[in-house]
Amino acid sequence: MSPSGVQKERMVAEDMYVLSADGKVLSSPVSKPWPNKPPKCTDCAPLFMKAYLMRGAGAVIHSHGMETCIATMLDPGAKEFRMTHMEMIKGIKGHGYRDELVVPIIENTPYEYELTDSLAEAIAAYPKATAVLVRNHGIYVWGDSWINAKTQAECYHYLFDAAIKLYQLGIDWTTPEHGPINSAKRPRSVLSSSIPNGCADSKSSKHCVVLDIEGTTTPISFVTDVMFPYARDNVRKHLTSTYSSDETKEDIKLLRIQVEEDLKNGIVGSVPIPPDDADKEEVISALVANVESMIKADRKITSLKQLQGHIWRTGFESKELQGVVFDDVPEALKHWHASGMKVYIYSSGSREAQRLLFGNTAYGDLRQYLCGFFDTTTGNKRETRSYFEISQSLGVDSPAQILFITDVFQEAVAAKSAGFEVIISIRPGNAPLPENHGFRTIKSFSEI
């Protein structure tokens, strides 16, 4: 690691600190005569260690580049920077030209080391990310080697600079079309780049609809009797066949972090996972045991939802699975879309799982009528803060312009507290509601 407060461009190898894997200093640079400052290891050390330990990084770069600061100011309430359909996205690990680049944004603190916990949370919540932005401060970028980290850092700076210039020109960098930004909603953030529809066209209404899935658009029985069992029954097969892939390695890292936390908290069903260099079958058996326990407890955690999404993707691609929605849903989606009303999904299932479900139904690909997807990376569905975050992302003038439809009373209360209009969906198999709950209810979207 580099020392703090020195002229970085004048450094030589002897000026670096050498640390052990647990962060202990093994050797320090020798002091230089005045006007050089006495050597002091970078204040970023605990943050660098998080990237090394949680992501297996080979190198980490911290930059205060102006583009990284301004990119976080384009939408002061955003928790993510998003961009798609830009050539330099291909320079970011695991991304292609058509993919949506998502970089988490954390809030700045007076002292660098105070960012450690929020950086760790962002790394855990965004397993595909290779960078974290710090608002009004800079960025942390990591890679497998110094070459990879440097290449990605250059690509990130280029993309942030492009977003700033596009913003100045009134062009939307978050959608595939890169059309004009709607001035009434500037700054704004569109949450899905994979929808080739008119979500950003000029006739769009200022009102939005946000839909829950389970018990609202889709029978609970489909999730509990089809989706969950399929994921549970195919965990071992999936892990065995994809064990050496980068995607599964990321899934396993995320599960390790969750299981370590579960063991500390005494969560029933949690079992230790052997280290990576242990026998493959031993590691997989421990992972399967933990995942089965998580599924049985219906836990709404990112590590489980991400792995389930990858297993379901295989099922949808092989046609073993087909998305199920209530008969009234497609017609309502078409109607809202034709009216210029934007429709979003907010579910505890991962965004990938949501896209798979709506992209593979008996009614065809329904994603053409949807403008974006939210999952638990936005926040717990029973917390008011989560709905506030959504309202900040949709570009409405008031949360009251958002209609949220769910079957869960606690979610309805949280959304209402954030200022949303709320309707509770009454579908076969849904849990009963408390008496005098005070919400409007429907049995079909045709009633709206």
Image (cartoon, rainbow, N blue to C red):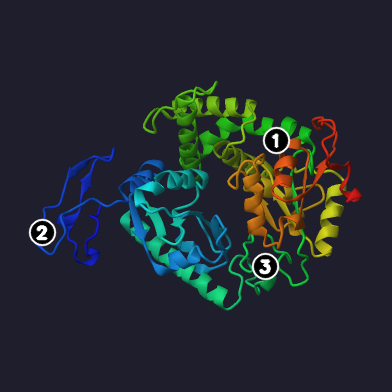
Q: Tags 1 and 3 in contact by the CB under 8 Å rule?
A: no
* Secondary structure at numbered mark 1: helix
Q: How many marks?
A: 3
Report x, y in % for residue 300: 62, 35
Q: Name the amino acid, label 3.
A: Lys
Residue 421 appearing in the image: yes
Q: Looking at the picture, tell me which residue is in the foreground, 37 or 289.
A: 37
Q: What residue did someone put label 1 on? A: 227
Kindly indicate the quadrant of the structure image that contains residue 150: bottom left
Of 265 and 249, the residue lying toward us:
265
Closer to the chain start, of discs 2 and 3, is 2
Identify which residue is drawn at 79% across, 42% down. 216
Q: Give the residue at mark 3.
A: 185
Q: Position of residue 189 (x, y in %)?
A: 62, 62
Vertical side of 386 occupied by 149: above or below? below
What kind of residue is marked 1? Answer: Met
- The numbered mark, 2 or 1, whose residue comes first in the sequence reads 2
Residue 32 is marked as 2
